[in-house]
Image (cartoon, coloured by chain):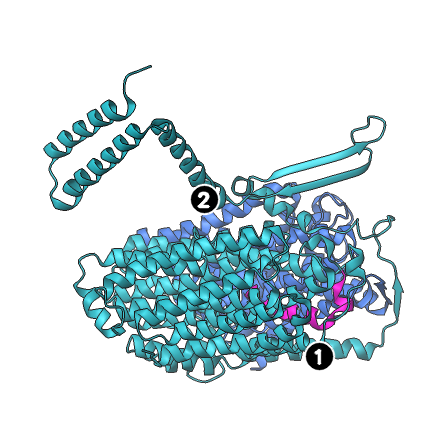
Amino acid sequence: MFIFDKLSILFVFLIMLGVVPNLFYSFGYLPHIKRKIHYLVHYFGFIASMLGVVVAGNALVFLLFWELMSLTSWQLILTEIEDKSTIKAARFYFFMTHFGFVFLLLFFLIVTNGNLEIDFNSMKIIASDFAYPTLLFFFAVLGLLSKAGVVPMHVWLPYAHPAAPSPVSALMSGVMLKVAIYGLFRFLFDILSNWQLEWGVLILILGAISSLVGVLYALSEHDIKALLANHSIENIGIILLGFGMGMIFLSLKLPTLSAFAFMAALFHSFNHMSFKSLLFMGAGSVLHQTKTKNMEKYGGLIKAMPITAFTFLLASISISALPPTNGFLSEWMIFQSLLGSASIDNISLKLAIPFSVFALALTGGLAIACFVKVFGITFLGLHRSTNAKHAHEVNMMMKIGMILMSLVVVSLMLFTPFYMKLFDGITSQLLHVSIYNKIFPNIWSMHSISDNGGIVSPLILLAGLIVLTLSIYAIYKSLNIKHRVYHTWACGYNTSAKTQYSATGFAGPIRRFFTWLYVPDEHFEKEVIAGHKTKFKDASFSVHVRPLFERSLYQSSVRWTNKMSYYVYRLAHFEQSRYAAMIFNILLSVLFSYRIFVHEFSWATLALESVVMIISIKVLLIGDKK
Amino acid sequence: MILYIFSIMLLIFLAPLMPSFMKMVKMYLLYKKPISIFQGYRDFSKLLSKEIIISKETSAITRIAPFLVLSPLLLTLFFLPPIVSGEYYVSFVDAFTITGLISLSTFFLMLLGLDSASSFGGLGSSREAFISALVEPAMILTLFSVSMMAKNLGIGQAGINLSLHFPSAHIASFIFAGISFFILLIAENGRIPVDNPETHLELTMVHEAMILDLSGFYLLLIESAGSVKFIIFASIFVSLFVPFGLNLPIVLAILVFIAKLFILAIAVALLEVNMAKLRLFKVPNLLGIAIVFAFLSLITFYVLGA
């Protein structure tokens, strides 16, 4: 019923690392939640169900806890129900998560032959006999990755995360998405055995696209929590880049490279859990003080909220993959595994993988830009609203939560060899190769597995940075330089909250460069003075970016469904005979398509049956021309 | 080890010379009376004796960030390729880490721009974020390609490998990577087609806008960071893409290395004199060229083996 192998234990560990600081934060946050009982019941139910999913030993338990996880998180999104947008977001989340659930159910129904209580080993036997393993793979991917928020099933994230209370966003983004990654490990290694090369390529492509799309939409966002939600899409993409490389290497029989890539994916899962939880906690504190999610209303919060600001800064550096933080180390590992593609023989694959390198590098660059924007606009400069002016540091419990989470980030940075040892246990269980000794010959330096791979020494880097910074600081102190406090030099103009750069303005150049993707709706209104175009006393500029995938994939499918149903409605026209005719035609087409696509295929019957269908539709449904 | 420390000292000594040297060459070519090559040192000593003016709008970031802008770059100096054969070099840090350290420095520089609540600072940060985001992929791809030719991703080992076995079989991809890296050198150091280091006009400035509000010792730190960054890029360029002279006798090897640096500086100065600054939204085209060359380098290496 339950299994406790290394993989499960590792993910239990991940969940606990994410949950324990979150508990403190959550209790600090509790006074601001109106429906306390509702919140607490679902909060603990959510944690328990996540733990249940990762230790589930058979399909029934897995599906039960998976569904429980979806339902409790759905109710948690609905905690602050007064807001209209919350209900919309929750409905969207409910739909998307059940969309995924359907595929998981289909997957399990096939691999268990309908008996949902058998364990994973028996499922593996059934799955290996199944004639269409790629179909199973697609079911697993659709089911799990719609939960993980991978493009194009990422659309719910930027709605659900802002609507949920901040501790819940931290849990959902930091921990729940990793449960989907756990599912990917479990399904691919324990159930599906004979992998195709194309599966790995598909995961790699999904990862590359998700990482780019996530970070690009994050840049255009000025709702701080929606921005962080978009970064979750990006980071899941990065994890999938590692995962996809692992699958490709394993299909090509390169187990050590594969183990390295899977370890990179696991490490990035841990790192993303740590820094994203911390970022959401910081965002929650800011939101709680300023009563708004709009970044344009923040500013100067570092003076009033130093602990929030500096923990947020640590997380920002880490998520931007800057050395010597943990985020850098895992992204470095993923780069190294992408570079390992040089030892692939398949030339087309070899030429294609540099595009993933490109995607990952561009993602890294844009993530730096984005986090300069978030940190700079939120915490630096002058306050842009009265709420931001009167903000003060949050209560003790919330502070403890943030400090504990930043300790998790620091521990991932300092004790990388320890975590690697854990991940090595997983890969040696799954792939039967142990590469820990190759990665860490000593604890100081971390080696890549690929032929001309690199080396990084996180601790030496950290020590070097600290020593150099302190020695420059010591020189500075010994010089005993005079200080004078004066106002900002803005070339003779006054500095005020309105003359600073805004978040929209900061992302301006990037938005303009990627305008083909964003297709922004820009509104610029100004009140000109005496007909001069360039002289105005009041102006307002607003820009709204509608996500491409939502517009093209989701809204247009809604539009097409509406259109189709309109035609069906016109055909039927409330006449019973027409309804009957329609049912008859549908029945006919089902029978015919069963015969053609499942039973046996021949062009002659296809042609004949099409003619019959067309005549039947014409005669029975459309009728004579009026 | 002595040579190693000497070479770092040499680079630190040369760092302030390079920008002044480039300015000198430019002024000479424009028939102006050239400034002294030691102008960098004069600025240094002058800034050292000045008081620091801090804006009242700033936060702790302004007091921390200048140190963190300089220290990653100083740390990078320890990881550069050797300039003399047999010299100690760092083998435990690879090229990605170096790009990461440079990005770390840029990250704090951009925060510094946003801290003083001035519109100029935000303007500079925003533009710098835009440019450095597009530099990143070209940089990684170029390093990927070079690591393939040098058979190592560590910059020190790569420098030695390239000088011992010049990749004459892969000369095409080598040159493509070189072109790409040269464009990146210009873009990352804010030289003319991308940014004009000498102007203080809001239409054109990028780097200067971010540091407009700094003074005294803080400005000194940032200015030194700028020159250190140039010397890092220049020495990586001359060690990886002009890998000659490493095996000469020590004194000669050092002289050849310095000569290569100065020739590179002259090349950059010539480019600056002959080109106008690009509009900000034309800069991606230039960086796009760098990305395309990096890809070309990889593809020729893989497909043609040339």
Across and down, in percent, residue A284 comes to 65, 65
Q: Quarter-wise, where is residue A422 in the image?
A: bottom left
Task: Please check the rendered image and state whether residue A310 is part of the magenta-colored stretch, yes or no.
Answer: yes
Q: Colour of chain A?
A: cyan
Read off the residue under disc 2.
A554
Pick the front one: B50 or B104:
B104
**Circle 2 — which element?**
helix
Image-based side of A252 in relation to B258, left or right: left
* Residues packed near mark 1 inside 10 Å, few (<14), some (14 to 19) or many (20 plus): some
Pick the front one: A150 or A53:
A53
Q: Residue at x 30, y 65 (%)?
A: A249
Q: Colour of chain B?
A: blue
Q: Quarter-wise, where is residue A1 in the image?
A: bottom left
Across and down, in percent, residue A547 comes to 52, 45
Q: Nearer the viewer, mark 1 or mark 2?
A: 2
Sequence-wise, which precedes: disc 1 or disc 2?
1
Give a yes or no on whether discs 1 and 2 share a subunit. Answer: yes
- Check the residue under mark 2 and report the chain it is in: A
Residue A471 numbered tag: 1
- Residue type beneath disc 1: Ser
Task: Identify the magenta region.
Answer: A300-321
- Residue type beneath disc 2: Tyr
